[in-house]
Amino acid sequence: MATSAELVRDTFSRVRETVGSVLDETPEDRLADPPAPGANTVAWLTWHLTRILDDHTARAFDREQVWTAGGWYDRFGLPFAPDDHGYGHTYDDVLAVRVAAADLRGYHDAVQDAVGAMLDGLPDDELDRVVDDSWDPPVTLAVRLVSVVNDITQHAGQAAYAAGIIARA
């Protein structure tokens, strides 16, 4: 029987597959093109969902984010603060994310590897641990992981949809 952590890890791995497919299928020179005026780009969606996965799990497991620890912040050279993960971005901010597919994939894979290592052997009773007491009720690890799953699966789907539109344009 699978553990809760194994189910979460499997869910994250499916997002990894989707991100890989999207990056494989989108021409490099079209990653930062919006599929329609005002829409999020494949590059921004991929960056954002990876930042959410990295940021939220790092906070929940009390570790430094891969974004800064792995040098990705410097490598990407984006005009945002190191702790920015895209929430509240304007359309101009979205268009500023111009990154090579190899870098998007590299960062995503590094975050997935770090999260997988955190989930390895995680006992179910750890899911009840409060990871954010600024909410009422306080947020447990289980709630945070479900929230991350919800967010990144939606954004991976949006990236796939945007890539499909771009491929047909």
Image (cartoon, helix red, strand yellow):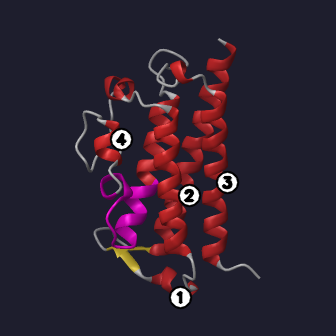
Res 18 quadrant in image: top right
What predominant SS class does the magenta segment belong to? Answer: helix
Q: Of the residues under marks 3 and 1, which one precedes in the sequence?
A: 3
Q: Of the residues under marks 2 and 1, which one precedes in the sequence?
A: 1
Q: Is residue 55 magenta?
A: yes
Q: Nearer the viewer, residue 156 or 146?
A: 156
Looking at the picture, which amino acid does disc 4 mark?
Answer: Gly
Looking at the picture, which amino acid does disc 3 mark?
Answer: Arg
Residue that label 4 marks: 86
Looking at the picture, which amino acid does disc 1 mark?
Answer: Asp
Residue that label 2 marks: 149
Residue that label 1 marks: 125
Distance from Cα at disc 2 to Cα at disc 4:
17 Å
Residue 163's place in the image compared with 118, above or below, is above
Residue 14: numbered disc: 3
Q: Crowding near pointer 1: few (<14 within 10 Å), some, many (20+)?
A: few
Residue farthest along the left direction in this orientation: 81
Distance from Cα at disc 3 to Cα at disc 1:
25 Å
Distance from Cα at disc 4 to Cα at disc 1:
32 Å
Q: Of the residues under marks 4 and 1, which one precedes in the sequence?
A: 4
Res 63 quadrant in image: bottom left
x and y percentages locating residue 92 in the rendered image: 32, 23
Magenta highlight range: 53-69
Q: Of the residues under marks 2 and 4, which one precedes in the sequence?
A: 4
Q: Mark 4 or mark 3: which is in front? A: 3
Q: Crowding near pointer 2: few (<14 within 10 Å), some, many (20+)?
A: some
x and y percentages locating residue 94 in the rendered image: 38, 28
